[in-house]
Amino acid sequence: MSFPVLDLVSLTCFFVCWIGYTSFARRKAKTTNCIARCLHQHRIYWMNELIGREIRVGEAALLANLERNITFFASTTMLILAGVLTLFAQVDKLESVIATIPFTAVPNHTMIQLKLVLLTFIFVMAFFQFTWSMRQYGFLNVMIGAAPVDQSGTDESLKSYALQMAIVQDQAAHSYNYGLRAYYFSMAVLSWFFHPILFIGVSLLVVYTLYQREFNSKAVIAITAAMQVLSEHKGHEHRA
């Protein structure tokens, strides 16, 4: 089976972008304010507030809304997978369609199958991430149901329990984020059907877009500012 050099280079660039950005974002989030880091602090505040409430209907509604979003993506992923698998039986037609598009590389039957395999792999992985996120939110619901009430806010063991709930919620959010990231990079793979140079360019564009949204967006600035407000508020409460 022939594997054109340019396709090999573009595929290598794709995996370097995906794996490299994931590793970079994980390390940078430990020292830099970003969506993941700041939202984790918000979750800690949220779970500490929850410990002091007897009625937790609001928390149940918020978590149900989060789970609903993840369920939507999980079910959508299954539909996409069904469509991609159907294309395996229509490779000849797909090849003829691509050949009619201007400026595209000459389609190769085997290469198209490999591209479909890559798309299948990406959406299978996304499905696993979304369903694992759903399960972790389910674990969190159990922990919230078991959480005692401490309106005084002085029980250190319950503060530790609240931290563990925040960690479970944070891990669920990470799984959801990884699933969404797979969707972003699947857009890059779609460009590979047209030309490997375009594949490289879109892979780099996806990394740039993810970086801007997770580290430099207006949402990050607002969430960071809100985190600082919460910290100051907690400091005033302790001094009072």
Image (cartoon, rainbow, N blue to C red):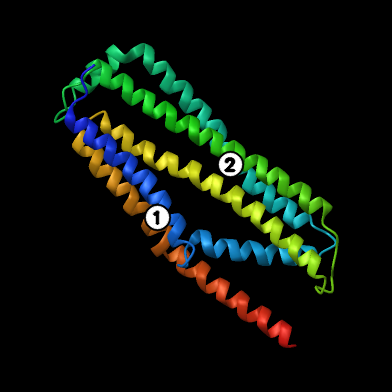
Q: Tag count in the figure?
A: 2
Task: State which quadrant residue 197 falls in.
Answer: top left
Which mark is first along the chain, 2 or 1?
Answer: 1
> Residue at position x 54%, y 65% from top?
38
Q: Nearer the viewer, residue 88 or 160?
A: 160
| Residue, far left | 103
Image spot of residue 221 (x, y percent): 46, 69
Callout 1: 10 Å neighbours few (<14), some, many (20+)?
few
Q: Is residue 61 left or right of residue 215?
A: right
**Which residue appears at 39% of the width and 29% of the height?**
119
Quarter of the image with the N terminus is top left
Q: Residue 205 at x, y = what percent? A: 29, 48
Q: Contact, CB < 8 Å: mark 1 with mark 2?
A: no
Q: Is residue 83 visible?
A: yes
| Residue 195 visible to the viewer | no
Q: Residue at x 60, y 66 (%)?
A: 41
- The label on residue 70 is 2
Q: Is 35 on the left-hand or right-hand side of 116?
A: right
Residue found at x 37% / y 15%:
88
Look at the image and tell me in which quarter the C terminus lies. Answer: bottom right
Amino acid tagged 2: Ile
**Residue placed under numbered mark 1 in the picture:** 24
Q: Position of residue 206 (x, y in %)?
A: 33, 47
What's under tag 1, amino acid-wise? Phe
From what the image shows, is residue 131 above or below residue 4? below
Depicted 107 relative to depicted 144: above or below: above
At numbered mark 2, what does the secondary structure look like: helix, strand or loop?
helix
Q: Is residue 184 left or right of residue 55?
A: left
Q: How dense is the environment of label 2, judged by Cα within 10 Å: few (below 14), some, or many (20 and up)?
A: many
Toward the viewer: 36 or 72? 36
